[in-house]
Image (tube, rainbow, N blue to C red):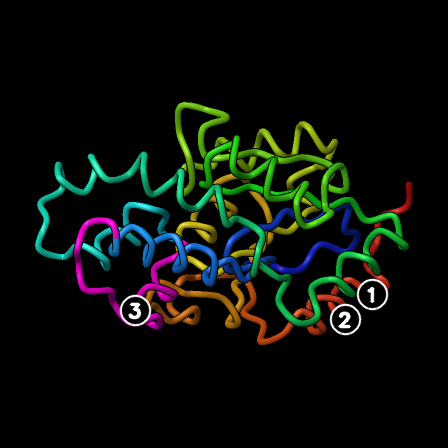
Amino acid sequence: MTQPLPDAIEGVLFDLDGTLLDSAPDLYAALLAQCEEEGEAPPPYEPVREVVSSGAAAVLRQGFPAHDEAARQALLPRYLQLYHAVMGRDTRPFAGVDALLEGMEADGVRWGIVTNKAGFLTEELLARIGWGGRAAAVVAGDTLPVKKPDPAPVRLACDRAGLAPARSLFVGDDRRDVEAGRGAGLYTVAVRWGYLNGGDPDDWGADLVVDHPQELAALLAGRQALA
């Protein structure tokens, strides 16, 4: 059951990969490098892109489908090294995201990030793309013992950003974003422009599904909470 949009919005929390940033090119480049090292035939780009929101383990399943889970786990540290080396090289905000964030900042609407990406990668990626220090809160996949779809990271981000959940939005491109946001008491928005993990955002139970960041900007217009 969906809930109504808050009359006054204090802030918006976002997933990172697939919602704010198109990071798939760099994650794919790291996978290609590892496939070459291991003598494995590289997978096509699109199936890898689709699962990026599910993390490095899902990417490795695409690159090494014949390996069992233990063998892929053994490849993970090297994959993260390779990704760290190229991280930010071809990662870009999705079209319209820069304008959305700049408009929110101009209107005094706080925004933050809740990602399942490891903290050391998250902070450095934000620095490399010039976003360091802009977010009111950043909660990574290892900030707490649990990660999305558990709502605890979303609640922590609200606390750190000084946001009331009932007056805030959570925006993401995966079902677990919707589940985490709803569990934390936020209005949930699913986006169609992300990776989607092969799913249909209309099936996730989000309060709203949007096609472009401009729609979210329009949603926020006139809904800012008074300081």
Judge left or right: residue 6 versus residue 51. Answer: right
Residue 201 lies in quadrant? bottom left
Label 1 sits on a secondary structure element that is loop
Q: Amino acid at mark 3?
A: Pro
Question: Within the magenta stretch, is there residue 76?
Answer: no
**Could you classify mark 1 by the number of other residues whose Cα lies within 10 Å: few (under 14), some (14-19), or many (20 or more)?**
few
Total number of numbered discs in the rendering: 3
Q: CA distance from mark 3 to mark 1?
A: 36 Å
Q: CA distance from mark 3 to mark 2?
A: 32 Å
Q: Quadrant of the C terminus?
A: top right
Q: Amino acid at mark 2?
A: Ala
Residue furthest to the top in view is: 145
- Marker disc for residue 218: 2
The residue at 25%/67% (across/down) is 43
**CB atoms at circles 3 and 2 under 8 Å apart?**
no
**Magenta span:** 37-53
**Could you classify mark 2 by the number of other residues whose Cα lies within 10 Å: few (under 14), some (14-19), or many (20 or more)?**
few
Q: Amino acid at mark 1?
A: Ala
Judge left or right: residue 153 versus residue 224. Answer: left
Residue 145 lies in quadrant? top left
Judge left or right: residue 193 versus residue 76. Answer: right
**CB atoms at circles 3 and 1 under 8 Å apart?**
no
- Dominant SS type (magenta): helix
- Marker disc for residue 221: 1
Label 3 sits on a secondary structure element that is helix
Which of 213 and 11 lies nearest the eye of the viewer? 213
Q: Which residue is mark 3?
A: 47
Which of 195 and 147 lies nearest the eye of the viewer? 195
The residue at 56%/61% (across/down) is 90
